[in-house]
Each structure stands twice: as structure tokens, then as C-alpha cells.
Image (cartoon, helix red, strand yellow):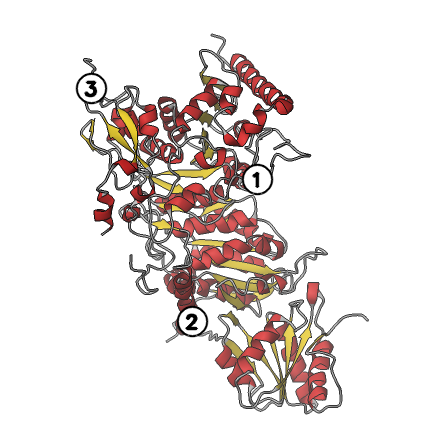
Amino acid sequence: MAVKKRPVVGVSELLQRPAPLAQGHRMCSGCSLPIVVNLALRSADTPVVVASPTGCLEITTSVYPHSAWNVPWFHSAFENAASTISGIEGAYKALVRKGKLPQEQRIKFVVIGGDGGTYDIGIQALSGAAERGHDFVYICTNNEGYQNTGNQRSGATTFAGQATTSPVGKVHRGKEQKRKNLTFIMAAHEIPYAAQATPFHFRDFIAKMRKALSVEGPAFLNVYQPCVSGWRFEADQAFEMCQLAVQTCLWPLYAVEDGRRWRITHKPAKKKPLEEWVKPQGRLRHLLRSENRDLLEELQRQVDEEWEFLLRMERATSDGA
Amino acid sequence: MKLMTWREMPIATAVPWPGCSRQLITGTWRSQRPVLDPEKCTHCLLCWLFCPDLCIPLSGEERLETDLNYCKGCGICAAECPYDAITMRPEAEFTASHLEEVLQ
Amino acid sequence: MTQALSLRIAAMTGNRVVAEAMRQVNPDLVAAYPITPQTEAVEYFAQMVADGRVLTEFIPVESEHSSMSACIGAAVSGARAMTTTSSQGLALMWEMLYIASSLRLPIVMYVGNRALNSPLNIHCDHTDSMGARDAGWIQIYSEDCQELYHNIIMAVPIAERALLPVMICADGFTLTHTMERVELLPDEVVRQFVGEGDLHTFPYPLLDLDHPVMLGPNALPDYLTEHRYSLHVAVEAAPEIVRQVEEEFAALTGRTYGSLEAYRLEDADYGAVVLGSSVTNLKAAVDSLREEGFKVGVLKLRLFRPFPAQEVAQALAPLKGVAVFDRADSMDGAGGPLYKDICTALFDLPRRPFLHDFIYSLGGRDLFVEDATRALERIRALVEKREGRQAVSEYLQVRE
């Protein structure tokens, strides 16, 4: 029983950084989002200013007059987090240029917003900000739907996903479209850095966040964020869901630099069948029924095809080593 | 909590009090609570890392007892502990709810 | 006391003069998008940025919703932000206008007034700015390019003292694209008048890391009313701030402005009320009718929001009849937007003038002096009961 008593590798450094979020926030019991926020912002070496679109994070941390934020934080509307951060970053550059802010004070600008406000209504602003090359990090916390309003389908919801606006009924069986691949879209903007992560794989996430913060220009992190309430799994299973998503290749962990160099940062030792990821989720229970076998097979096919594509992109863009 | 008048409220919707959400005792949400076995705990701090409600206070690089003021009883700490040092017990097993004192 | 200013005389269009004023203000950030008829203002300013004549951070955003969002992000950070738009662009940023005022941000926006679709029409009417009249912005209309230039400059201290966003309106093409002789103030004079702008002009700047702040929360029924009341109080205090800034401007330049300007109304029996460049046409109509012995005058309204109800009531009360000139139709069966505000202003008077509303010059249709005289003659005929009316409002220029 002589076990060594020390923190796991990668944690000690985080201990030195102040927590960006405070206790008393109203996120669900078992929500993975606070861990995403804390890991991301504790990875920063400089002060940060954060903007969020409307969504779970915004609602649960800012019910007036209570703020769960220990860092400067701003929200205005749903579709404009990226244009808002463009204005904040632009203001910072102007104020430094005019001598109204000290040059030495480096600040990093971060958006943390959900898939609703990013894949769909926010995509124009994100695309514009990426095209203009503002220096910011956009963290999309992907819980596959508009969860703050009760699990409506978004562009990030997987094929066959059940949501209140893509329900399983007598004629239609859940979402009939593939999910949008926003990480590919952001890579196609040829921004310095675009990557996928999960809060469970925290060393990978921290490395990616540090890389995102270090590049000059736009960086995009698509972070898997399992949702207890929307996906209907047990309150203690959020990190098990992260593991399953990566082990089944539903949520590959990869990074793309300048849209040109594609690198998978974690390859599962043994790829698990997608059913393992489906089983714990109440919202996907219909996929376990025999009459919906075709849907599960199609979703498996899509996951496999994307994984194969990523492997090919990694090979095609490696340095020939 | 007494509600502010319009004059007491900073203009422009501003909330210039970082972390004042600590006034909200979210510990009232839970129906189960984590119990730590200090013999098994190696202070790996994975529970600290994965706790959604920042309920694992630290002393240096060692964890202390869970902050029950804010613990929502999700059970993630117990699920993620590699040493089975944490078990979740129903809240009903704990007679004197210290929350009653806190809420007074 | 007015110092002897060395004014620069130039021939400039409205768009050009706005860019000139913006250059002299040298804001921290401008985020703007092209839309006729104000695009040229952005183009001129972009050239100034490219030539290093300003230190402004210029963001060529991908939509007007983003231009207002970026300006809000900048202003909330403690920077001085300006933008420009018209028509569909103003309509597209509609939700953000309410946010700019409820966040008490001193953003200055130039609006080149243009009709709203459908059909698409690039010419002038006031439907765009009228659609924004309930958003808590200060709205000032310009009669000519000289006034437009002064309005942009005055807007900066107005916005920063009231901590409310300011919209300066100018008729599309009539002002935006028409060249006038303008007198430009020296750069140092403008700089002194508007000041350099301070990080803490907005009291809770995001970029003040020593005082981390959270802005734009969500509020429940227990608090929303108090947030709105706070804004309500600020809006009520705004007209006095506008007056103070105008007074200081007059002391500096000798040019006096007010919420309204009465032209030949003192001994008039009948009058007209109008916003924007058509005032000039109405003044000509008034002069022409006066020569025939018809005692008329015109009330030019400059400050439209907050609405100067008391001053309007005072100016119009003695008249027998007033022709309201609305360059937008509220499409509600009850007249145009200006008509309704005039009604409100006059409602409590013990004796009210007869009021009739003329919807005019939609989509850039010119207001000829004959149209204006016809309207004034009609109001007299209505009062003297020589003519009747179907409704409180009529279209002055429709082909039937």
C-alpha cells in the first residue's frame, strides 16, 4: 500500500494559476464545461479577457448580480462572439498604439462559446474574424446541440442524433443530416492553428491551448463537452463519455497548422465500436433498437470514413519522415 | 439576499465584483455526497482537476476535505479516482446538515 | 468668446465631410461595412488609415451586425468607437442597437438615410432611422453638409458625457453625395473640443485588468426593471447634455444649434414640421407663400431622440394648423412616426393646433417647392373646412 503521494503529471503547474471560475456557478451537477474553462484559462501565461455568446456558460455564470468570473468577461448576443472579440482585440491594439495602455501588458483574447453559437448562428462572425486574422483563441465547447434551451439540434449534432427539433417519431428518426465539420472549415481558413480536444485528455488539451495562445493570429479549439442533461447519461459519466468518444474515433484528437499540416495527437490503442459511445446516452437509445440498426451502421460508417480521411491527411502532410 | 435598488446598481449592467457567485450555496442541490478514505488517497489531484464545482480545496499539493457548501453531488470525483478513495453516500445518511447552519 | 478661427473652406459632399470629421476626431476604432449611400465615408476614411493620417484601428467587418458588435466590444473595452451605415445595414444591426444603449456605450454612428427593402431602393427616406427610434439612442438630423460636419464633431462629447450612443442622420444622396461649400475647423480646435478620449470614459472598461468586471449578464424579473429604469433616467438627462455641448460649441465656433429651429413662426398662422434636408425646400416654400400674404413658417427639428416635446409644444401651440412632414410611413394606419411624436407633444395643451400628416419623398422622390406649398395650402383648407380628409395622414406625392 506504499503509494507515492503526488499530483499526476501536468497538474502541478495548473496549481500555480488562479481559477478563472468561481464556486457558486449554476452549471448542472456533473457538467464538463467548467473543467474546459478552467483548463483552458489556466494554460495562459498572460492575463486573459474572455467573451462568450449566449449559451450555457453565459447563463450559468452571469445571473445578475452574481458573477462566477474572476477574469474580465463580456457577453452581448448570440451570433457575435467572434465579431465582439475582434472589437476588443482591435481596441487593445489601438490603445497600445496610442499609448493609453502600456505596451508591456500582453493580454490574450479568448472566446468560449457553445456549438450553437459557433457552428450555426455564429459562423459568419467566426469566419470573418478568422479571415481578418485577429489575434484570438476561439474555444468551441461542443455538446452537440442547443443545450441551454433543452437539446435542440445544431449543425454539430451527429447524424441520427435525437433532439427536440430532430425527434424520433413515426416518420422521421432523429437528425437526417451529417454533422458539420467545423474544425475542417476552420482549417480551410488556413488559420495558424485549429484543433480538437477533450477535457478528459487534459495534457493534450493544455498543450493545444498553449499552442493556440502562442500563435499570432486566429486559433480555433473544438472541445468535446459531454452534457449530462442533454445526452442523458449519469451525473458522474462526463469524462467516461470523453474517453469513449476518442476511443471510438467519434471525436478524433488532431491539430492542423495553417491548414496544411495535419497531425493526429492521439490514436486509440484499440478502436472501439461506436455502440460503446451510444450505450450510456438516453438521447441515443433509439439506435440500440433493431429497427434502427441501419442508422447506427450509417453513423459508424461516417465516423470510420472521417477517421480514415484524417489518417490519410496526416500521411499526406507529414514531412516525409 | 436583499435586492438592490436601481441607484445601488452600477450602470451599464456591470458586475464589478469578481466571483461573487460564491454567495450562492449550490451545496443545497445535492442528494449524495463524496466521502474520502484518506488511507487510499495519494493526492494525485485528479479529483481536484475534474470537479466541476471547484470543491476540492488544497493545502500545497495535497487535497483537503470536499467543500460541501458547493458540492452538487455529481460523483465525478468518485468515478475518476484511480484508487477508489472516494465513495458517494446518500445525503440522507448525514443527519446534522451543516448547510442549515450555513443558510442561517 | 469666439476666437478668430482659421477655417478651411472646401467643397465637400456629406460623405466626404463625415470622413473629415472622423479624421479630426481620430477615434480608436472604426468597424464598418459598405452600403449605399454611405460607403464613400468608409472609403475616404480607409484611405486616411492607409496613409497613416489617423491612428485608428480599422476593421472591415463582414456585415453590419458585426460592425456594431465590434464597436460594442471596443467601447466596452474602454476605446472610442465609431461606425457608419444606412438602410438594410442599420436594420441588420437592430438587436445590437438596444445593447449599445443598455450598456451605456458612447458609440457615434453616421447614418446616411435610405429606404428599406422591398423593393430595394438606394435613395433617401427615414424608414431606417425611424425603425431605430425606440432603441435608446440619441438621434440628431442634419439639414446640410455644414451641419452634418458639426454634428459628427459634437456627437463625441455628447455621447461621452451622456454615456449613450449617438446617431447622426443625413439624407441619402441629397446630403451624402451633394457637394456644398463647407467651413472646416482647424484640427487642433476639434481635438481640443472632443478631447483625447480616456480608457475610463466608460466606467467599467474590460481592459482595466486591475478591476476585472463582468458585463452583459442575464437578469431575471427581479432585476430587469431596475436596469431599464437606470437607462430611462440617463435618456431623460440627455437633452440637457446635448444643450450644454451645443453651447460650448457655439462659444468655440460662433455657430449656434438647438433641438429645433423656428423659421418665420413667430407671427405665423400655419406651419410645417420637418426633419432633415427638406427643411431647405420648406423654407423656400414659406418665403414664397409669405410673398402672397400667407403667414406661414416652418419648424426644423434637429434633435429627434430624446424627443424635445416641451420645446415643440411651445413653438407650435400658437398656430392654427400644422403640417407634419413624415419621410417614413409607420404602416399602422395612424400616420408617420414624426406625426405621432408631435401629437404626444401637443396632447396636453389646453388649445391644440389642427394637425395633419403628409407622407413625402419616400425612396428619394424629390420634394419640389410646389409640393410643399400645396401641403401648406391644404392644411389651411382643412382648418377653414373648405376641404375634408379621410384620415389623419395622406401621401403627398402618390400617383393615383
Can you tell which mark lies on residue A164? 1
Say which element carries label 2: helix
- Residue pointed to by mark 3: A5
The image position of residue C136, as x and y in percent, is 48, 64
The image position of residue C174, as x and y in percent, is 64, 64
- Compared across the picture, whether C378 is left or right of C210 comes to right
In space, the residues marked 3 and 1 are separated at their CA atoms by: 47 Å
Can you tell which mark lies on residue C386? none
Task: Name the front one of labels 3 and 1.
Answer: 1
Q: Three-letter amino acid code at disc 1?
A: Thr
The image position of residue B33, as x and y in percent, is 29, 34
- Residue pointed to by mark 2: C236
In space, the residues marked 2 and 1 are separated at their CA atoms by: 45 Å
- A245 and A94: which one is in front? A245
- How crowded pointer 1 is (Cα within 10 Å; few <14, some 14-19, many 20+) is rated as some
- A208 and C378: which one is in front? A208
- Using the image, name the chain to which the residue with label 2 belongs: C
- C57 and A253: which one is in front? A253
* Image-quadrant location for residue C106: bottom left
Q: In which quadrant of the rendered image does the N terminus of chain A lie?
A: top left
Say which element carries label 1: loop
The image position of residue A266, as x and y in percent, is 43, 17
User: Is residue A181 at all visible to an observer of this figure?
Assistant: no
Q: Residue at x 49, y 15 (%)?
A: A272
